[in-house]
Image: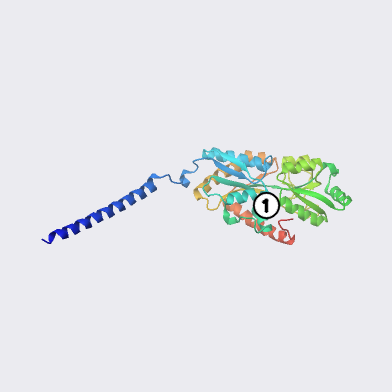
Amino acid sequence: MRVQPNMAKTSLIKTSLTKTSFANTFVLIAVAAMLFGAPRPASAADWPARPVTLVMAFAPGTLFDTIGRSLANALSAAIGQPVVTEVKAGAGGVVANAYVAKMPADGYTLLMTAVGPVVMRPLIDKSVGYADSDFTPIILIGESPNVLLASPKIGVNTLKDFLAYAKTKDNKISVGHAGPGTVGHLCSVMFSNLAGIDASSISYRGVALIVTDLLGGQIDAAFPTYSPATKSAKILAVTSEERVDFLPGVPTLKESGFNVVGTTWFAIYGPARLPPEILAKINGAMDAFLKNPDNKARFGEQGFRLLGGPPARLSERVAKDRVTWAPIIAGLHLGADK
């Protein structure tokens, strides 16, 4: 009979189909296990499931540090997870910015930085290693003027006295600042040019170190951001447009005949493409702290004006300052080595 061979062939086909179906079923089961059984990355709705790190761009022991820790505590209370501060000072804030620019946008690494590394340094050094597109603006914290300090060792009490002292040194003096590309650095260069001073520019990692060297006479002058620590040295002038209430009797450089105006602001950023839900939570918690009247009064007494607001306010400030400082930097022919 010829039926038998056809039956065998049919049996083989059924067996082959059965094996193929089993293999496909096995693959589907394996994929399902990977999708539903394996651990998945936390979504924005799950944030935060662990501690958050706030990377600080400048050294501890300053008003920058005090404000940063206060914001970390406020955020921690709002989100129910620890917020730890981690200092990565160096190169006028560039080290911290470059570090956070490469971190994942999961809300677990934030950056507290300042106008210098955000606006000025990229204008001075095109190879700084990061750009606006590497960050998510979160909130503009606030601002403070820079001050011209003189060492008590040189025995001057006014800006006029200081200029006379410089002449006795053939206009060759040493001036400290918080690092290349900071407001203090640019103010020192602008003032030196206008005053005809041949200044030796010295970078420091923080205000405390600047004040220590001023008190010891290692440097003649400095342009740090104002903080209570700066009162240990002689404050000759402020770099704000108008005189400030917390320094009665101290003139501005502008009214003294030197058109040097600049304030240092601090801000919070995250890596690029931070989820909107996480951005909103962080901004909301920090804005509530910055708008609190008691906090405004407390930091106002230390010479710092709290601002806050939506992320757009920070972006607008960056754009405005870039327009202001770009021609100044170009006119000074300022490079990263100066």
Picture quadrant where residue 289 is located: top right
Mark 1 neighbour density, 10 Å: few (under 14) some (14–19) many (20 or more): many
For image coordinates 80% across by 40% down, the residue present is: 215
The three-letter amino acid code for the residue at tag 1 is: Gly
Number of numbered discs = 1
In the foreground, 169 or 243 = 169
Q: Is residue 107 left or right of residue 23?
A: right
Residue 15 percent location from the top left of the image: 23, 54
In the foreground, 133 or 3 = 3
Q: Is residue 26 left or right of residue 164?
A: left
Q: Is residue 249 above or below residue 1?
A: above
Q: Residue furthest left?
A: 1
Q: Is residue 116 left or right of residue 103?
A: right
In the foreground, 54 or 195 = 54
- Residue 125 visible in the picture: yes
For image coordinates 16% across by 58% down, the residue present is: 7
Residue 205 percent location from the top left of the image: 70, 45
In the foreground, 48 or 327 = 48
Picture quadrant where residue 249 is located: top right
Residue 239 percent location from the top left of the image: 74, 50
Q: Please tell me whether mark 1 sits on a helix, a strand or a loop.
A: helix
What is the image's colouring? Answer: rainbow
Image quarter (top left, top right, bottom left or bottom right) of the C terminus:
bottom right
In the rendered image, which residue does mark 1 sit on? 116
For image coordinates 64% across by 41% down, the residue present is: 67
Residue 127 percent location from the top left of the image: 65, 58
Image quarter (top left, top right, bottom left or bottom right) of the N terminus:
bottom left
- Residue 324 visible in the picture: no
